[in-house]
Image (tube, helix red, strand yellow):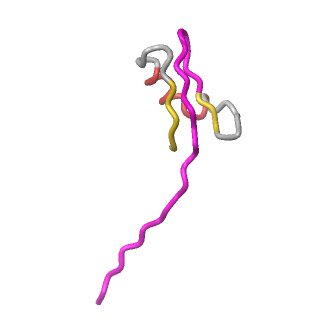
Amino acid sequence: MRTRARIVKVDGHRTVLWRTEDSVRLQSRTGRDVTALWINLAVAAMSLPPGVILDGVM
């Protein structure tokens, strides 16, 4: 019997992360603030130096 592997592609959420002097903000591609949805990432990003901007897909 032949087994076939299936790859399911799930598009992620385009997000920009800003590290400011006193906080972190995550924003969706549409401009919506999604920091509360990704709070664990926001907390971890507090260890980044202020001024860092990351753009990626989650």
Name of the residue lying farthest toward the left: 1
Magenta residues, start to end = 1-25
Q: Position of residue 8 (x, y in %)?
A: 47, 65
Q: Quadrant of the N terminus?
A: bottom left
Q: Is residue 23 above or below residue 30?
A: above
x then y, percent, for residue 30: 70, 40
Position of 43 compared to 36: left or right? left
The outermost residue toward the bottom is 1
Residue 15 placement: quadrant: top right
Please tell me whether residue 48 is drawn above or below residue 2 in the rendered image.
Answer: above
Nearest the viewer among 23 and 1 is 23
Q: Is residue 1 above or below residue 44?
A: below
The rendered magenta stretch, by its main secondary structure, is classed as loop
Q: Residue at x 52, y 19 (%)?
A: 19
Name the residue rendered at 61%, 29% in the picture. 36
In magenta segment, residue 43:
no
Residue at the (51%, 26%) spot, across then down:
53
